[in-house]
Amino acid sequence: MNSKSEPQKIPVGKTPETREERLKAALKANMARRKAQARARKSDGKTEKPN
């Protein structure tokens, strides 16, 4: 039984952390891009229409 539980814990423990870290980094980069795009659109709208 010990031989089964040890190999299962190693891959299962490392894979989600690595995947979670990648997803977290991708989400952070995506949010930064979206915020930059929103700021650019907002500033473009103000220069074109001075209401």
Image (cartoon, grey):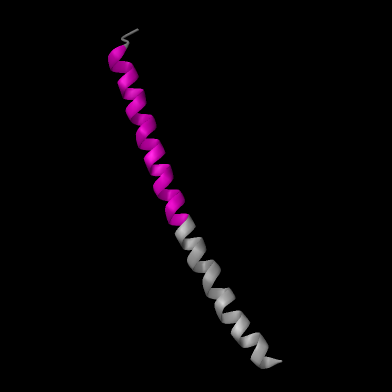
Residue 18 in the image: x percent, y percent?
48, 67
Kindly give the residue lying farthest to the top in the view shown. Answer: 51
Instruction: Left or right? Give the position of 13 relative to 30.
Output: right
Residue 45 covered by magenta stretch: yes
Residue occupying image coordinates x 31% and y 9%? 50
Q: Which residues are magenta?
A: 24-48
Residue 4 in the image: x percent, y percent?
67, 88
How many numbered marks does the figure carry?
0
Asked if residue 3 is positioned above or below residue 24 in the image, the reply reads below
Residue 27 covered by magenta stretch: yes
- The quadrant where residue 40 appears: top left
- The quadrant where residue 41 appears: top left
Kindly give the residue lying farthest to the right in the view shown. Answer: 1
Residue occupying image coordinates x 43% and y 55%? 25
Residue occupying image coordinates x 61% and y 87%? 6
Instruction: Left or right? Give the position of 1 relative to 48.
Output: right
For the C terminus, the quadrant is top left
Residue occupying image coordinates x 42% and y 45%? 30
SS majority, magenta: helix
Asked if residue 32 is positioned above or below residue 2 in the image, the reply reads above
For the N terminus, the quadrant is bottom right
Instruction: Left or right? Give the position of 34 relative to 15.
Output: left
Kindly give the residue lying farthest to the bottom in the view shown. Answer: 2
Residue 45 in the image: x percent, y percent?
34, 18
